Amino acid sequence: MNLINDNCFNAFNKIKDNSIDLIITSPPYNLGNNHHTGNKRHQAYNDNLPEAEYQKQQLEFLHKCFKSLKEEGSLIYNHKNRIKKGIQISPYEWIFKSDFIIKQEIVWINRSQNFDKIRFYPFTERLYWLTKKSETKLFNAINHYDVFDYKEWKPVGTKNNHTRAFPEKMVEDVLKCFPTSKVVLDPYMGSGTTGVVCKNLNRDFIGIELDKDYFNIAKERIKKTTY
């Protein structure tokens, strides 16, 4: 386990090119520092960049991921369609500008809802499977289709510490489908869910997290996890 408390763009400089088998991560969504999910209001920090700057940042992030991955490596990039000023913004807007090949889009019905009656309620997020080569494959060990619901991938473990935590089951299912991926990276580690599951499944893990509080939560969670 290699845990780094730093900005991921700085930390990528410490990671060798073509050295990572699998990246599983979810960046900040740039939802704004004050937004709502259903009837709940959320306060965030540093999640309110001008949209053009945010997309430029994410494109640079994808470039860093591309360089760090092995030729047969994969990136599982969790993001969502966002609505700003009445217009939907898709992650494809910057993914299409990257060097990655889009292998598949996976839909996660996680009920992260917005109840404004001016549209059909958004209820989903996406996992984009991105690779360097079109020949790259996964092994569907869980025998599943490309839609997962909230009962299958239900957020657990961190409660109020990190409201956007990965479900452990999500990471577990992804890792099972990449059985030969030994070195796993999460550049936006958050509260450490990817690291916890990697330790459980005996995978080498590199985690990067800028926020000191989340970093300490992740470090403690991973430390308490037994093989």
Image (cartoon, helix red, strand yellow):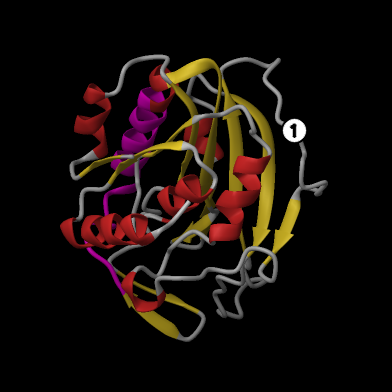
User: Residue at point 39% right, 23% down?
Assistant: 63
Could you tell me the amino acid type at mark 1?
Phe
Q: Position of residue 125 (x, y in %)?
A: 59, 57
Residue that badge 1 annotates: 139
189 in magenta: no
Q: Total marks drawn?
A: 1
Horizontal side of 94 relative to 121 (left or right) equals left
Check if residue 51 falls in the magenta segment.
yes
Residue at (68, 47) in percent of width and height: 106
Residue 144 in percent (x, y) is at 80, 49
The rendered magenta stretch, by its main secondary structure, is classed as helix
Q: Is residue 93 left or right of residue 48?
A: right
**Left or right: where 197 falls relative to 107:** left
Residue plotted at (36% across, 15% down)? 17
Q: Is residue 34 above or below residue 210?
A: below
Magenta span: 43-64
User: Nearest the camera: 34 or 100?
Assistant: 100
- Determine which quarter of the picture holds residue 208: top left
> Which residue is nearer to you in this view: 227 or 82?
227
Q: Position of residue 227 (x, y in %)?
A: 48, 51
SS for dot 1: loop
Q: Residue furthest bottom?
A: 39
Q: Is residue 134 above or below residue 23?
A: above
The quarter of the rendered structure image containing the N terminus is top left
Residue located 65% across and 58% down the image: 108
Q: Is residue 65 above or below residue 144?
A: above
Local packing at callout 1 (Cα closer than 10 Å; few below 14, some 14-19, many 20+) is few
